[in-house]
Image (spheres, rainbow, N blue to C red):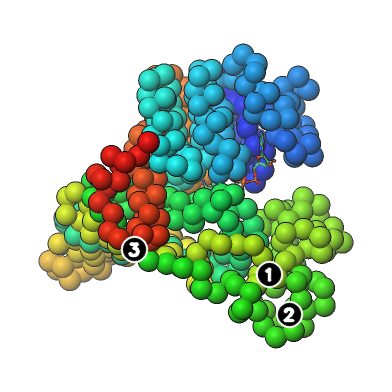
Amino acid sequence: MMKPIDVAIVGAGNRGGEAYARYALENPHDARIVAVAESDPARRGRLSDAHDVPDRARFEDWQTMFEQRKLADAVLICTGDREHFGPALRAIELGYHVMLEKPMAVTPGECLEIASAAEKAGLTLTVAHVLRYSPMFRAVKSLLDAGEIGRIVTIQHNENIGYWHFAHSYVRGNWRRTESSSPIILAKSCHDMDLLYWFAGARCSAVGSFGSLVHFRPENAPEGHTARCLDGCPHLYTCPFSAMWVYGETPAGRWPRSVVTAESSREALFEALRTGPYGRCVYECDNDVVDNQAVALSFENGVSATFTLSAFTHDVSRTIKIMGNAGEMRIHLERNEIEIHRFSDRSVHRVEPQVPTGGHGGGDEGLMRSFVEAVRSGNGGAVFSARESAEGHLMAFAAENARLSGEIVPMDRFVAGVE
Ligand SMILES: NC(=O)c1ccc[n+]([C@@H]2O[C@H](COP(=O)([O-])OP(=O)(O)OC[C@H]3O[C@@H](n4cnc5c(N)ncnc54)[C@H](O)[C@@H]3O)[C@@H](O)[C@H]2O)c1
């Protein structure tokens, strides 16, 4: 049996402390957590204790961890969006293989710099584009490559964020403001830009975009509302965004309640809602990211695509229609279903990819497995390179540029202007 790889974790929050750490617990023959850098002492202690990380390998921040010599084969960088570039470059400098949470960085220049640094050092740098590693999207890609719908002509891609999920992450939560995280088209939809690039099979050539923050604004608050849901708001049981049900009906320890408090009692939850960010009325937050955005894209091989992200959906899912000259493919991620209509014999086929286990339709686990394999190979190989992951990020930056300027943005011109 092969030896597990030694892993250091930077940022022990929801991703580092739960999604990826769980993989190490469940697959001890693959990965072993040997060092943790986390600024929150409780989170640092919890993760370190669960993996028997010695005191000397527990650090307050990534800067302190990276003052040491290399402590592990690889590092998982799971800090917030604006703390990716610094630790990624430093980790490469120290010779770590890196699994970097998305977005790679918050400017196009920084994304390209990370990709170049990893290439130069000959190290694996895998971006956590988890969907690419899910059984569903692996199946979609192989069906497309096998020519099931012929030559791809156009793609319609919807990202259904879900009204309560949007309220949690993009109105009350970490990704509510562009200046403290990044525009939502990057923060949330760099995954989707990456999928479009992967499916289209060519680089994007131009982008146009529209979108705005329509609903989660003070002027849309209902009559008589209070600044916090639990402060006697008359809409506590009727508002679709009420913290009472978004969190109160989620079992303890489960996302998104686990983000509000790590404690399991109702008292602890109510206290966090009375005092913390997640108890705020959705019309009284300091959010500015858009709640809807439409993007039109063209690719160098002639494929065209439209992408829509929206807060206003009942489901948290992605629904995609890929239209080829020989057939049509409909993808429903939440239902784990691919439907193929073949034009030649008017037949309809349904494919059900392997039932996923774990987060992101099995993508979290698939990503970790693939990363472990890449690190073991030791030659800087990865299923998808950092350079390739940067493409989807560039499309997202260009889309935001198009939305703000109201102009069509040619990618060549956009990339040439990247510093
Ligand atoms: N791949 C995906 O599908 C996916 C899904 C959700 C989030 N993300 C991304 O993962 C990243 C982390 O998200 P999260 O939900 O885990 O956030 P989080 O806030 O739960 O975790 C981030 C952690 O980093 C810690 N931290 C901050 N500064 C630090 C420093 N200097 N050194 C060490 N630790 C530090 C924080 O204390 C926090 O615990 C974000 O960039 C987010 O966009 C990716």
Q: Are the residues flagged by discs 2 and 1 in contact, CB closer than 8 Å? A: yes
Residue 406's disc is 3
Q: Nearer the viewer, residue 344 or 106?
A: 106
Residue 284's disc is 1
Could you tell me how far apart the alpha carbons at marks 2 and 1 are, in whole angstroms? 10 Å
- Which amino acid does the dot numbered 3 rest on? Gly
Q: Earlier in the sequence, mark 3 or mark 2?
A: 2
- Number of residues whose C-alpha sits closer than 10 Å to that of mark 1, classed few (under 14), some (14–19) or many (20 or more): some
Question: From this viewpoint, which residue is outermost toward the left?
Answer: 344
Looking at the rendered structure, the secondary structure element under dot 2 is loop
- Is 122 situated above or below 189? above
- Which amino acid does the dot numbered 1 rest on? Glu
Q: Residue at x 41, y 19 (%)?
A: 121
- On screen, residue 47 versus residue 110, left or right, reads right
Looking at the rendered structure, the secondary structure element under dot 3 is loop
- On screen, residue 190 versus residue 299, left or right, reads right
Which one is closest to the eye, mark 3 or mark 2?
3
User: Quarter of the image holding residue 246?
Assistant: bottom right
Q: Nearer the viewer, residue 283 or 28?
A: 283
- Is 205 situated above or below 149? above
Could you tell me how far apart the alpha carbons at marks 3 and 2 are, in whole angstroms? 35 Å
- Is 310 situated above or below 139? below
| Residue to which mark 2 is pinned | 225
Q: Residue at x 56, y 62 (%)?
A: 288
Q: Nearer the viewer, residue 369 or 412?
A: 412
